[in-house]
Amino acid sequence: MLRLQLTPYSENPTWHWSGACYSTLDTRSRIEPFDHPMVEHLAATDGRRTLLVVRERVADRTVCDPEVRDLTPAEYDQARDAVTGWPTDFVLVETEPDRPVRVTAGSARTTPLYLATDGTALVGSWDMADLRPHATGLNPKDVSRLLIYRPRYSTETLYRGVHRLTERATAHFGGHLWITYPDPALHRTPRELAPDADVLGAFISTMDTAMDRRPWAEETTLFHLTGGFDSGTVATRAAERYPGRFPTATLLIGGPGREQQIRRRAEIRDRVRFADSDLVVDAMRYLPLSPDCPWVNGRVVNPTEEPLHRPFVEMARSIAAAGARTVVTGLGGDEMVALTQEEEPHKGLGEVTDAQILPWVGPRVPSVLEFADDGIAPPALINSMTLLTLETTAPVLLKHGLWPVHPFADPDMVALGEQLPFAWRELKQLQRRRLAGLGMSDDVVYPVERESFAEVVEHALTTYAPKLFARMLAEGSVLFDEGLVDPDGLRTAVDRLTPGRYVEERDAKILEVLSLHLSATAFLH
């Protein structure tokens, strides 16, 4: 939600607001907030200490005056305490003469903040591409994690020299960057329900509270309605409360689930009243790896941005062109009702043994993965996989002037899900029963076909990927140089990328190799 440059030990540390950014009198420090109606910023000083905050707005409060206000030391301490207890996304910057600058993130992260330094100044941005000059090479550990689909939430990113400020973490910079993690967040466990427990009533009430933290109910708010349980649950509740106000949008998938997705979305939109506008972008027409894909065109794109980058960029562009400013999603719904290992033993994402199964995995990867969980962030209020997902989603939206809202990622929603008995979380019974209570048919509540982007990935890999891989194998790659991808194994795998030989479970993960290669090529050259 901001871009920054901070130079500690400034001779002129007094901050002022220019109307577009905060800066010190010597202009060596600067903070540029993201310009959006859902974002506000403020600053205060007691004559020595200065705090500057960029944060997501909360409802029923007037927008803060951005001018730097003068406070007494006691008032300053109260203001800082109030900032750190803010219930939505925020970033706090603190400066003080003769002390390192400090940057702290809130717990309800909606947007990322990446940091880097040249030894003199600390720079940061929600867009990792802004930090390209500070990247010194690939980070083998993070690349190895992604190659086997085992992402981890930590201060590390794919590039050496570029760091992530995780939730509740604080970055200290006085010439060297030092990031401290917070204490682990406490979590709840499933409980037995009282005989008269109204689970759906509690769910609806908590969902309303999560939404109403923010001034979201505007004509410029749009709902990402995929037709699935999570986005459907959030969007229908909003339409119940404000009939006819909100437009919707989605990416249309391919394969057997396509017609079912169309039917389910149509029924959801008919059951409760949305605005007439419904943007449908056909992902099969805007394929990843196609000639218009930002990766293929050499654009500098963070590889952890939307894995299906091209169609999501097109959808964001269409949403912004339609006049929307805020996009509400169902992200986080999977994790809210996830089953524990004790309830249902299951493989996690990216087992280390996958390094021996995937033929393109390079010789260096198995040894690097021995330390895959070293240095990861402590448990957060929100599931780490949810935080990573929100981080991949935000940059594409922010680049088009859109602000994301994710009710299922609200801490109160997470806490409710943690306490629900197994029967309400299994197979998303909570969301299914909510939609059934609205009178939805079995086609919506118990769909037969899988709805996913698997066919989009398959078509991209069998249509465009072979030529891109051929160029990669001919020209070389930093992934080969680092021993992270084996060219011989990759060549064998690429030979199978034909419509008749493609097998999703075996071949789909190779998309990660190409996205990493194309992104790293642009980022490091």
Image: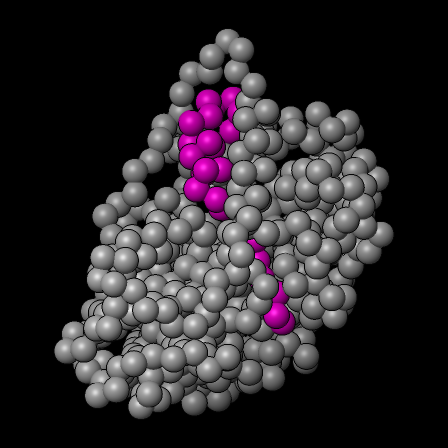
Q: In the figure, residue 89 lies in which quadrant?
A: bottom left
Residue 489 percent location from the top left of the image: 44, 70
Range of the magenta residues?
A: 400-425
Q: Residue at x 32, y 69 (%)?
A: 70
- The residue lying toward the viewer, choosing from 372 and 470, is 372
In the rendered image, residue 432 lying in the magenta stretch gets the answer no
In the rendered image, residue 402 lying in the magenta stretch gets the answer yes
Compared to 515, does 225 lie above or below? above
Residue 478 percent location from the top left of the image: 39, 82
Q: How many marks?
A: 0
Q: Residue at x 55, y 49 (%)?
A: 59
- The residue lying toward the viewer, choosing from 87 and 448, is 87
Q: In the figure, residue 173 lies in which quadrant?
A: bottom left
Is residue 420 in view from this perspective? yes
Residue 53 falls left or right of residue 1: left
Residue furthest to the left in view is 98
Residue furthest to the top in view is 195
Q: Main secondary structure of the magenta part?
A: helix
Compared to 407, does 478 lie above or below? below
Q: Residue at x 76, y 30 (%)?
A: 440
Q: Residue at x 58, y 73 (%)?
A: 399
Residue 523 percent location from the top left of the image: 44, 83
The C terminus, quarter of image: bottom left
Q: How is the image coloured?
A: one colour
- The residue lying toward the viewer, choosing from 145 and 109, is 109
Is residue 168 in view from this perspective? no
Residue 153 falls left or right of residue 111: left
- The residue lying toward the viewer, choosing from 519 and 359, is 519
Residue 40 percent location from the top left of the image: 49, 64
Residue 156 falls left or right of residue 328: left
Compared to 95, does 437 lie above or below? above
